[in-house]
Image (cartoon, rainbow, N blue to C red):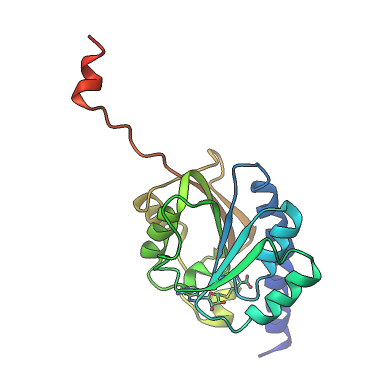
Amino acid sequence: MSFNDLEMENIYDKLKPVIYEKIAQALCDPSATPILDVGCGDGKLVNFLAFELKKRVFGVDVSDADFGSAGREAELKKVSHLVKFVQADSKNLDIFEDNYFGAVVSVYALHELGDALAVLKELNRVLKPGGKLIIADFIPGGEAERLWGERYYTIAEFKSMLNLSGFKFAQTEKDFIYLYEDVIFILALKLFPKKFYSPFEFMTFF
Ligand SMILES: C[S@@+](CC[C@H](N)C(=O)[O-])C[C@H]1O[C@@H](n2cnc3c(N)ncnc32)[C@H](O)[C@@H]1O
């Protein structure tokens, strides 16, 4: 790996505090609780959100390799009582009931989670209606793709998958914010179920 490549990796890392701050700002309203971080890795975002927002935050990852250091950091930040790290595959979050979370976040991870549409449907299930979904991830055609040779979703794919999994976009002008040339920040809301009128309810109109 060349010096320039290391510099680029560094840029994506340096972007994390910006992403964390943006997520905290978006989730400061009281209804956005508890929070789930999907593909939480070393748990830094989980501990950050618990510390900043004083809310309950769960981190889910298929690997528990970094949960030890995540727990130690939680102790240092005095947020152990607010955080929980759970080893699970994001396609199957049966451990959480329907409509449990006020917000779900995922940073630099969605492209790694396998069948993203299945994951988004599962995230929709565990979110409360009106709950916020925030995704920060790479898109194709940039330095990240060249560095790691991974397959990223295009904006059109994100839009289609979010529509198919029951989300609507929260911003009218900018559904997708570019944090860097190939890093996007998406804010979407879980749609409320369509109201079903029973024939009896309908009769009361007359
Ligand atoms: C690139 S890392 C990002 C970690 C962290 N969000 C960050 O910003 O540093 C992607 C994470 O997704 C996790 N992951 C991969 N497949 C997963 C799956 N099916 N379910 C849950 N987590 C998964 C990996 O173990 C890894 O920790």
Q: Is residue 115 at all visible to an observer of this figure?
A: yes
Front one among 14 and 139:
14
Q: Is residue 135 at all visible to an observer of this figure?
A: no
Front one among 172 and 61:
61
Ligand 1 occupies quarter: bottom right
Whether residue 12 sits left or right of residue 165 in the image: it is right
Whether residue 60 sits left or right of residue 192 in the image: it is right
Q: Is residue 42 above or below residue 117?
A: below
Q: Is residue 152 above or below residue 135?
A: below
Pick the quarter of the image with the N terminus: bottom right
Pick the quarter of the image with the C terminus: top left
Front one among 152 and 105:
105
Find residue 142 and report its image quarter.
bottom right
Whether residue 115 sits left or right of residue 78 in the image: it is left
Find residue 12 and report its image quarter.
bottom right
Q: Residue at x 59, y 56 (%)?
A: 35
Q: Residue at x 80, y 71 (%)?
A: 76
Pick out the residue farthest to the bottom: 1
Q: Position of residue 63 (x, y in %)?
A: 53, 81
Q: Position of residue 80 (x, y in %)?
A: 71, 67
